[in-house]
C-alpha cells in the first residue's frame, strides 16, 4: 500500500554519494530541511576491513563463483569478497545494451556514500579550455559556464576534502589547493625529470583526495593500501563520513536508507515537482515524500533513468525533456585504451609483501591539442595515470635454492595508461527498456554506446607517446599496448545524459543544473556535463553541486522556487 510521508521537506536529495553528500551538507547547514533518499543501506564502519588479510576471509578472496552468481558485472572494478555486499546485485538490478555494443556499468554502490566508498580518489580541475572546447575545435557545445565561475567552488571543496598534490602551473590543468604531495619513487622521479627535459611534458604525483596531514577528526594516510575495503581513519574522502555526517549533525537532514527512487512526482497544473515516489528496498512497498524542490544526485545514468521513468502525459518523453536531449550524448573516458610499460632494473628497490603501499600513482596531464601543441590526428586529448610497481621475480627460472634466490630479485616497472576524452555523440544514448524491470518493478535502462574514430586515433597515440616517455627515461624492454575493443563504461565516469546549456532547445539543464522545464528540479551529478574533458570528473561534480545549491537557495529566497 502506498505510504505518504506526513512531513514535507524543503528539499529532497536523491543519492548520498559525491554530489548528494555535498548537496545535503550545503543545504542543511544553511538551515533547510533535507530528506536524503539513498537506495543503499547505512554502512557501518565495522565493515571496513582494509587491515584484514585475505586468508582471514571465508573464501580467501578467491571468489569468482561467489561474484559470478550475484555481481558478475560489478566484479569488474573495486568489488571483491571484502566488499561485494556494498554493491548492487547485477541480477536484481539489470540493464540492457544495444546489440554489439557492450557497456560495463560498474560501481553501482548500494551503501551510504555511493561510489566514494571505493573510488580511486584522483582529483583534477577542468581548465577554462575544457569548458570552451566547442569554440576551440567546433565539436559539441560549450558549457554554459566557465572556469572563473567554478573556481571559488573548487577552492571550497578542496579545502574541505583535502587533496594532496603538487602545483605545476599548467594552463591545461589548473592547480588545486594542496596538502603535501605523496613522494615519487626513484624511477618515477627520473621519469619526471627526463620527460620534462627531453619532451617538455609534465609527470606529477597523482592529485588525490587522501590526507597527508591531519584534518579535523580525520587522520593522515598510513599507506596500508587497499582503500576500496574502507578506511578506518577516514584518510580518504568518503562522503558517508564527511559531507553526509556533517549534514546529519545539523539535525535538519533525514537520511532515508533503502529508498530506491522510482520517479519524481509533479503537479500538472503548475508543472512543478512535488516530491518523489520510491520503493522501500526491504519491504518492497511504495512510499511518497514531498518537498519544495527535488535534487537528483543518483549518478548520471540513474538520474536519467529516474527522469525517464517520471514521464507523464504532459512530459511523455521523460520529465524535463522538452528538448529531446535527455539520455543523449553519453560520455565515458577511454580507460587505459593505450599505453606502455618498461622496466627500470638500475633503480630497483627491495620488494616487500608488507608495504608500505602508497595508494596513489603518477599523472601526466594532457599535452596534445593544448595552446602550445596541435595534432591533426584527433580532437581533444588524453592524460596518463600509472606509476612504479616493484614485485618479486615470480617467474624466476629454476627450482629449489636457485628459484629462492631468483625470486628475490626485484622487478621494477613503470606502467602508463591513457585516459582519453570521449566526444559527445548524439547517438551514444540511454533510454528505458520497456520490456525489462528490476527486482523492485522499476523499468531499467538500455544503453547504446561505442567509441568512434576520434577515440581510436587517440588510443594509437597513447601507445606511441607512452613509449616515447619511457624510452626518454631510460626504461628497458619497453612494451606498448593498445586495446581498441575496450568497452565503454570501464572508465566509470558516465557523463552528459542531461546536459547543461544556454538553449532549452538543445539542453536539459541550465548552468545551475536546474531543469529548463521544471523550475524546482535539479540534477547535480555528472549528467549535466556538456563535454567530458580528459580529467577525472568527481572534483568538478562536487564543485558544481555546491554552486548549484547556492543558486537553488537564492532562488528560494527570491520566491522563485
Ligand atoms: C572503482 C572506482 C574508481 C573511481 N575512481 C575515480 C577517480 O579516481 N577519480 C574520479 O574523479 N572519479 C572516480 N570514480 C568515479 C566517482 O566515484 C564518481 O564520479 C562519483 O562518485 C559520482 O558521484 P555521484 O554523486 O554522481 O554518484 P555516486 O557517488 O555513485 O552516488 C550515487 C548514490 O545514489 C544512489 N542511488 C542510485 N540510484 C538511486 C535511486 N534510484 N534512488 C536513490 N538513490 C539512488 C546510489 O546508491 C549511490 O549511493 C571512480 C568510481 C569507481 C567505482
Ligand atoms: S592507504 Fe591510506 S587512504 Fe587507503 S585505506 Fe590505508 S590509510 Fe586509508
Image: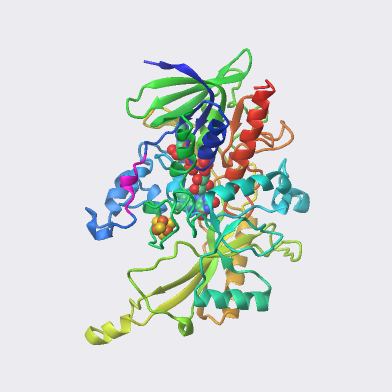
Count of numbered circles in the view: 0
Q: From this viewpoint, is residue 183 visible?
A: yes
Q: Is 510 located above or below residue 428 in the figure?
A: above
Q: Nearer the viewer, residue 63 or 47?
A: 47
Q: Report which quarter residue 172 is drawn in.
A: bottom right
Q: From this viewpoint, is residue 490 visible?
A: no
Q: Report which quarter residue 420 is drawn in.
A: bottom right
Q: Report which quarter residue 61 is drawn in.
A: bottom left
- Residue 325 placed where, x, y %? 64, 34
- Residue 342 placed where, x, y %? 50, 76
Tell which residue pokes out farthest to the bottom in this image. 402
The residue at 46%/51% (across/down) is 119
- Residue 464 placed where, x, y %? 60, 71
Give the left or right position of residue 103, taking residue 224 as reference. right
* Coloring scheme used: rainbow
Q: Is 103 located above or below residue 393 in the figure?
A: above
Q: Which residues are magenta?
A: 43-49
Q: Quadrant of the C terminus?
A: top right
Q: Nearer the viewer, residue 148 or 365?
A: 148
The stretch drawn in magenta includes residue 46: yes
The residue at 51%/77% (across/down) is 187
Give the left or right position of residue 227, taking residue 371 as reference. left
Give the left or right position of residue 544, taking residue 184 as reference. right
Which quadrant of the render holds ligand 2?
bottom left
Q: Quadrant of the N terminus?
A: top left
- Residue 145 placed where, x, y %? 72, 42
The stretch drawn in magenta includes residue 322: no
Q: Nearer the viewer, residue 450 or 375?
A: 375
Q: Nearer the viewer, residue 413 or 218?
A: 218
Q: Is 6 located above or below residue 540 in the figure?
A: above
Amino acid at each position: 500500500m502506498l505510504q505518504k510521508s506526513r512531513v514535507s521537506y524543503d528539499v529532497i536529495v536523491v543519492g548520498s554519494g559525491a554530489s548528494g553528500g555535498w548537496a545535503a551538507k550545503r543545504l542543511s547547514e544553511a538551515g533547510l530541511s533535507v530528506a536524503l533518499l539513498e537506495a543503499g543501506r547505512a554502512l557501518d564502519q565495522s565493515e571496513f576491513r582494509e587491515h584484514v588479510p585475505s586468508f582471514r576471509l571465508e573464501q580467501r578472496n578467491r571468489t569468482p563463483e561467489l561474484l559470478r552468481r550475484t555481481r558478475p558485472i560489478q566484479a569488474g572494478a573495486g568489488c571483491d569478497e571484502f566488499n561485494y555486499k556494498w554493491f548492487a546485485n547485477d541480477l536484481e538490478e539489470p540493464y540492457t545494451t544495444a546489440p554489439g555494443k557492450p557497456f560495463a556499468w560498474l560501481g553501482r554502490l548500494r551503501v551510504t556514500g555511493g561510489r566514494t566508498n571505493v573510488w580511486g580518489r584522483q582529483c583534477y580541475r577542468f581548465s577554462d579550455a575544457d569548458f570552451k572546447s566547442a569554440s576551440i575545435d567546433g565539436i559539441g557545445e560549450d558549457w554554459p559556464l566557465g572556469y572563473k565561475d567554478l573556481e571559488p567552488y573548487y577552492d571550497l571543496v578542496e579545502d574541505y576534502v583535502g587533496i594532496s598534490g603538487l602545483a605545476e602551473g599548467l594552463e591545461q590543468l589548473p592547480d588545486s589547493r594542496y596538502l603535501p604531495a605523496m613522494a615519487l619513487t626513484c624511477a618515477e622521479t627520473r621519469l619526471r625529470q627526463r620527460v620534462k627535459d627531453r619532451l617538455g611534458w609534465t609527470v606529477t604525483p597523482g592529485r588525490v583526495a587522501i590526507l597527508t596531514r591531519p584534518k579535523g577528526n580525520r587522520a593522515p594516510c598510513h599507506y596500508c593500501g587497499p582503500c576500496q575495503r574502507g578506511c578506518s581513519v577516514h584518510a580518504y574522502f568518503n562522503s558517508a563520513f564527511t559531507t553526509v555526517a556533517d549534514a546529519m549533525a545539523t539535525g535538519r537532514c533525514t537520511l532515508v536508507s533503502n529508498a530506491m527512487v522510482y520517479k519524481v512526482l509533479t503537479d500538472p497544473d503548475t508543472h512543478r515537482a512535488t516530491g518523489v515516489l520510491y520503493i522501500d528496498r526491504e519491504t518492497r512497498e511504495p512510499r511518497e515524500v514531498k518537498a519544495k524542490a527535488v535534487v537528483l544526485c543518483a549518478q548520471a545514468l540513474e538520474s536519467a533513468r529516474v527522469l525517464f521513468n517520471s514521464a507523464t502525459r504532459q512530459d511523455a518523453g521523460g520529465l524535463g525533456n522538452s528538448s529531446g536531449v535527455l539520455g543523449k550524448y553519453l560520455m565515458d573516458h577511454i580507460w587505459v585504451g593505450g599505453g606502455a610499460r618498461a622496466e627500470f632494473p638500475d633503480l630497483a628497490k627491495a620488494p616487500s609483501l608488507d608495504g608500505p603501499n602508497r595508494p596513489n600513482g603518477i599523472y601526466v596531464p594532457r599535452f596534445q591539442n593544448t595552446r602550445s601543441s596541435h595534432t591533426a590526428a584527433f580532437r581533444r586529448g588524453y592524460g596518463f595515470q600509472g606509476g612504479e610497481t616493484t614485485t618479486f621475480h615470480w617467474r624466476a627460472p629454476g627450482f629449489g635454492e636457485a628459484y629462492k634466490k631468483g625470486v628475490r630479485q626485484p622487478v621494477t616497472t613503470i606502467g602508463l595508461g591513457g585516459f582519453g576524452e570521449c566526444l559527445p555523440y548524439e547517438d551514444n544514448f540511454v533510454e528505458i527498456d520497456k520490456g525489462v524491470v528490476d527486482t523492485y518493478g522499476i523499468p531499467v535502462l538500455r544503453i547504446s554506446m561505442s567509441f568512434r574514430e576520434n577515440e581510436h586515433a587517440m588510443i594509437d597515440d597513447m601507445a606511441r607517446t607512452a613509449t616515447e616517455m619511457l624510452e626518454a627515461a631510460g626504461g628497458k624492454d619497453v612494451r606498448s599496448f593498445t586495446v581498441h575493443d575496450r568497452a565503454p563504461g570501464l572508465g566509470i565516469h558516465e557523463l552528459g545524459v542531461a546536459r547543461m546549456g544556454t538553449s532549452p532547445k538543445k539542453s536539459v539543464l541550465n548552468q545551475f543544473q536546474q531543469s529548463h522545464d521544471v523550475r524546482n528540479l535539479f540534477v547535480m551529478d555528472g549528467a549535466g556535463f556538456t563535454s567530458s574533458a580528459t580529467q577525472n570528473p568527481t572534483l568538478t561534480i562536487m564543485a558544481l553541486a555546491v554552486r548549484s545549491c547556492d543558486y537553488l537557495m537564492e532562488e528560494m529566497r527570491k520566491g522563485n522556487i
